[in-house]
Image (spheres, coloured by chain):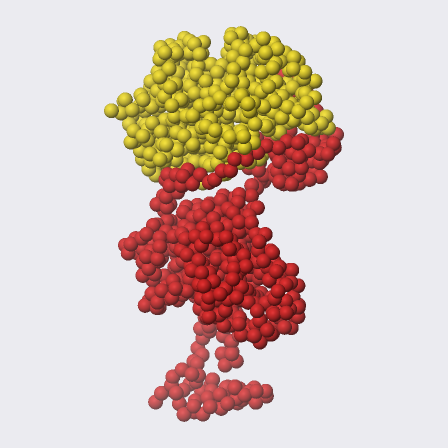
Amino acid sequence: MRHDFSPLSLKGLSKAGDIVLPGGEGFPRFSETEFIKHFGRIAYYMNQDDREGFKLLTAMMGVMPSFIVRFILWMATMNHLFPGPLGAVLRQINMGVRGVLFTMYYSGVDGPGKRVLKQLNYNTCINTPYTEDTEMETLLTQNNPLNSPMMFQNSHENPGPTEAAAIFDKARSTYPAIAALTVKERLGFITKLRETILHRQEEIVDVVQKETHKARTDVLISELFPLFEHLEFLEHEAEKALRPEKIATPTSMMGKSSNVWFEPLGTILVISPWNYPFYQAIVPITCSFITGNATVYKPSELTPLKGLVESILIDAGMKPEWVQIVYGDGKSGVELINQRPQKIFFTGSVGTGKKIMGQAAQYLIPVELELGGKDPMLAFEDVNIDRAVKGAVWGAFTNTGQSCTSIERLYVQESIYEKFKQGLVEETKKIKIGVDKDGSADMGGMISERQIKIVAELVKDAVSQGAVMLTGKDWDFQSRFIPPIILEGTNHKMRINQEEIFGPVLPLMKFKDEAHAIQLANDSTFGLSASVWTHDKERALRVASKIVTGNISINNVMLSEGNHALPFGGVKDSGIGRYKGVHGLRSFCNMKSVLADSDSKKIEANWYPYTPLKYTLFTGLTQALFSMGLKKWVGLVRFGLPLESHAQKAKRD
Amino acid sequence: MTVHSSYDVIVIGAGISGSFLAEEMALSGRRTLVLEAGSAFTRTNYPRQEIDSNSRLYWGGGVELNTSATLGLLRPKVVGGGSIVNQALVDRFDKSALDSWKSNSGINYFNTDDMAPWYEKAEGGLTINEIPAEWRNGNAKIFAEGFKANGYTCAPLQRAQKDCRFADGNDCIECLSGCRIDSKQSMPVTTLRRAMKAGCQLISDFEVKKLKTSNDMSTVGGMWNGREYSFTAKKIIMAGGAIGNSRLLLNSDFGKKLPALGKNFYTHPQFMVLGLYDKEINAHKGPLQSYKSYDPNFRLKGFKLENVFAPPVAISMLIPSFGRQHQSKMKSITQMACIEVAIRDTNPGRITVNNDGKSIVSKELNHTDEQRKKAGMDAIHAIFSSTGAREIIPGDFGIGLHLMGGCNLGVDVNKSVTAPDFTLHGHPNITVADSSVFPDAPGINPSLTIMALSKMAGAQLIKEGR
């Protein structure tokens, strides 16, 4: 939780902290440690006037010499000697300052607080195992009328044709108001949105974790952190990226100016997947909004995060009709596409992508498709094995493997294969599985029941053809909590190396040399991203250039998408188009080409009438203009000037 | 502000009374909505560190003060209210308490016979147990020994708990911020859950700011997630506690017609005293509370003693002063026993609101109350001294956590706020049955009686509705 206390107030509080809690006897001194970092956890919940009073008091302490602060605190403990209002104020100071400091110090906050409790020999526990109270959690969600999307003017559920039409009518009628805002004005909302998300971070993590069964850290590092990077990218770069771009004007058009304007398209339909439900909501919504479009957003029916996105957009001050949210399954998607949005931005599976493009083709709606991947990792013999192993394990299993850029095929050069394999198995066995509340789990559960079945089917298929599970043998092929599985002995004929697994399974294979590695990497219908791991920089670039893919990381994994200034998208079955970065932002725009001439008496040479003389002069001019050097300029004078002059007076007989 | 939905009944506050009444209403088929200013937690997500349990489960970020800053008022702000943060002590009122209520309010049903069936009904929905003798901790032992040594009488506490499974090594002090094994019979485990299963709706984190009432329809308005919402209902049940109810009614201009509103406020002022021993007491281990005083003499003198403890932040606040000496005292936290005196206060306080609508609580001890406190303190000193304490540290300030009155029951419109049928005088569509209706301080833990009164009020509403 954040607070709005000034650095001076915090200095005053720290000063008082060292007087009240000087440490010794094994206790840390207050300011030696990071207790003050936890102040927001109290300040945020204080009564407004208490907070203002406390700000003033601590700011005063910030400028006072320590001995005066000590004196004030001492006076405060002597409160019983003072009757009336003075005594009351002293007691308030005594309770307030000591209370806040003791709370930060003796609460057992992570790190220093735990050390303090240890020093006190104070240790309490609940040892009886307890499980989630799913019954009450469901009741709390279902029985809250404000969680019902119908309470929000901008949400809809399973719309039929009439409601879908109304949604797009609303979008089309609100679009001019968004388009009329300058990019800078729109950025005001983006800043407010970033602050809202920062402020509500823990709540968001809770909601996402509940619907996805993810490890808490996965939610934080792969949904929220990159989201902030994206929003910050917009704040820094959007104005520049969307400013009219001046383009060179050819010599033949001397005196005119050429520009590209990045205008909104109108209404954008965003259809998002379930693997990163919050990130994949806010990133496309903000790309669509910042470029001036009205947005209709449909989350996956598996992870709707009902009410969350609406309330965050509203907290950011955005009008409900700017972004309308539609809950529902594929049928709702069909209804929405029938309303002919100006563009469809879809992230999801190849199968659904094909259906969407098929339907969009009827209306010639442009589509942006971010589809699946089958990302190869190539580890060459000169690589730092320990590091590459750790990278592979994270890249394969982060988000429980439910990421379009997860490593799905790991190729290791023969000479280091055994050593690599041993490390891989060891590291994988260390992974802690669970839906944690404190960041202690590495890997959560699967989001989609259907996907569990697909993973089970692919693994069983591979095993039946001789593949061996080096880890994860204890999985019952049903539980949501699939242990990380390393598969050895698979080949490209098996489905596991052809279809997207989208789960925590990593087939491990060998390659002989560079050519073999490239051939294996490219032997896939997908081309989303890949990674090349080698100490030899030249080899890295050489291999990277030969892999048919949209994104590539060298000596790292899933890193290219980490830079929000880089465009992201795939080739082959991995999709069409790019999003993120300047290129991606512009894909939400109508790139309008503008060539401006001035109003004058001048008649263009290429206008009617055509005359034999014009033809002769044009022939000479064409020859000259598209030649090089002096000839060009001489020709321009020789043919251009007479042509211009002829054009002004030529008449049709 | 647009009206978002209409209900048969809106309950303001999801504490003990609100939950009991919500259950009655929902089970009788009424479309019911509960609005609660605090957040909802379940056993997996109760705050685990004192810094969060103080700030997230109580108003004002942990503690609010009376005007003279002599009492820290602990006012729960969470779905489940007091039942989340208390130790689930459930006691029926005795003749002394009910007699006093009867004479103060002029209401005849305040007698042990008439109340008995309602107590039974209240107890029926909960599992109530004693802490098994074998698990009593060091703090409880000192309490019992000291009582014996001084010829006082004590008794085991009755607690609304199912099975604390002490054999697993559980420490009840953790449950002060919500019981993670759902042994404590908190409202979300019991009545509120039953209400919600019967279709009762609940909005948490919704602070009601205004209440407007006319003949057949009342409107409730407040904030949720930064937006204003309002709801209407035929009946309103106010269950926001003494301060919450008084504040909302005062802010909604009920003060003019109800001259007693906000008056007659009691808190059972409690004073914790620490006894320092040379041996390990480990008062924080196992069951937190096992005994209460059961001494007719104490009752006569207007106080009771309880065997309590608190987590480190609270203990550090009780120890006066600061600096090295304070920290070195803290180091003996596992060698501390703790007894608290709670007095049956006679001097009523008063709740008012300032221009910003914030509640202001004036509440002082009069001479009688001071005498009661002193008598209790003397008894605690005797207990600690007789059991070998090397030092006795009276807590730095008093605590008010039984917040009662402000909307007191009575027949006289000028001296009371709530009529014998639990409706506000002159407002038959507003029902109140929580601790705010207490006519005076009973000197006994209030929660079971809040439940019984809520059952009575619920029956009244249902009877009327037929």
Q: Residue at x 64, y 37 (%)?
A: A114
Q: Is residue A409 above or below residue B186?
A: below
Q: Quadrant of residue B236?
A: top left
Q: Is residue B453 left or right of residue A199?
A: left
Q: The C terminus of chain B lies in which quarter of the figure?
A: top left
**Can you give x and y, in whole percent of width and height, for residue B292 in the image?**
53, 17
Residue A356 seen in this snapshot: yes
Give the total of numbered labels. Answer: 0
Give the quarter of the figure containing the N terminus of chain B. top left
Q: Quadrant of residue A415?
A: bottom right
- Provide the letter of the chain coloured yellow: B
Q: Residue at x 66, y 31 (%)?
A: A121
* Nearest the eye: A645 or B235: B235
In front of the other: B285 or B3: B285
- Give left or right: position of B441 versus A99: left
Left or right, B109 with reference to A308: left
Q: Quadrant of residue A627?
A: bottom right
- Residue A555, compared with residue B29, is above or below; it is below
Report the side of A540 relative to A19 (left or right): left
Q: Position of residue A344 (x, y in %)?
A: 40, 62
Q: Residue at x 32, y 68 (%)?
A: A362
Question: Where residue A228 appears, x then y in whole percent?
Answer: 54, 53
Colour of the chain lettered A: red
Query: Residue sitting at 53 percent across and 29 percent down?
Result: B166
Looking at the picture, how far across and down is residue B238, in whole percent? Answer: 39, 26
Residue with the most extreme left position? B466
Q: Is residue A375 visible?
A: no
- Observer-nearest of B363 and A202: A202
